[in-house]
Amino acid sequence: MSLWRFYQWVAAYCAQDLRCLHDRYFNYRADVPQSVYRVGRWSVYETASYGLFWGDEDPLDPDSHRPPGELQASIPNVDAEPTPLSMRMRLMLNQRIGSLESDWSVEGSALDLAARIETISACYVSVGIERSVYTGGAHSNGLFESFNWNRTADAPLNLAELFKPGIDWQQPVATLYVQHLRSGDAGINPSILEEQSFLTAESLKSGIDKDTLVTEHGLKIVVGGLAPAYGMILPGVELKWAELQPWLASSAPCAGESPQTN
């Protein structure tokens, strides 16, 4: 299916230009291993958008106060009919990505945005949205946020729904995350993290819901912006359901009938 899509696109884009066809084909061959991937039993492929932005300034003016802006964004789609991604979920995910693209034209000179599906289970779909934003200086800034969906309710998943009512669930989750990260479980030498004063449970807990993906096995936490090497996003650390059991609600992970599309 992906090669068929390529032929359909390139026929309109390149017309009869064989050099164009040649260049696009080899670019396609280079990108496909990353743009088509498996999530459980599902095949996921990406569609992309590109853009340039100069605002009100002359892009050829050497005294321009703002360099040309560049945008590259990829959006995941499941290669199946019917798809396990509901129409409502796809609409809300696209709205979120569109909002980040709009922010680019105001806040950044370059934005590379990649939304990748992490999990498609009977209960949940989770999507990680990773951004590399360049606004000037020596480094871009790596940012991450999660998009979690409750398939049973066909609605956004509020992580608080997974935990017992009335408890400060962010604190134990953030504490477990820091313990795993500093133990070397994520593949980062713990000595590198010693200088990262922001990596404490107390400083991370307020944003832990934004950084957390729901998986079949637990919660995967990804934190962006490892200083001073701006642009780096920390490897994800997965906390197993068993570790989180003391704080989880009885319905997490959710039980019951699987949606018809699974």
Image (cartoon, grey):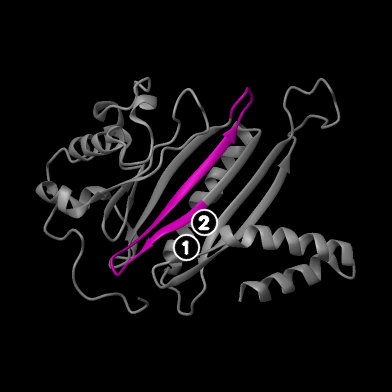
Q: Residue at x 65, y 54 (%)?
A: 49
Q: Residue at x 31, y 75 (%)?
A: 259
Q: Position of residue 78 (x, y in %)?
A: 49, 69
**Image quadrant assignment for residue 29:** bottom right
Q: Position of residue 203 (x, y in %)?
A: 29, 26
253 relative to 156 in the view: left or right: left
Q: Residue at x 26, y 58 (%)?
A: 217
Amino acid type of disc 2?
Asn
Residue that mark 2 sits on: 94
**Image quadrant assignment for residue 223:** top left
Amino acid type of disc 1?
Arg
228 relative to 189 in the view: left or right: right
Which residues make up the magenta segment? 115-139
Q: Residue at x 61, y 28 (%)?
A: 135
Above or below, comparing residue 248 to residue 175 in the picture = below
The residue lying toward the viewer, choosing from 158 and 119, is 119
Dot 2 surroundings within 10 Å: few (below 14), some, or many (20 or more)? some
Q: Position of residue 54 (x, y in %)?
A: 75, 35
Q: Secondary structure at mark 2?
A: helix
Is disc 1 in contact with disc 2, using a CB cutoff of under 8 Å? yes
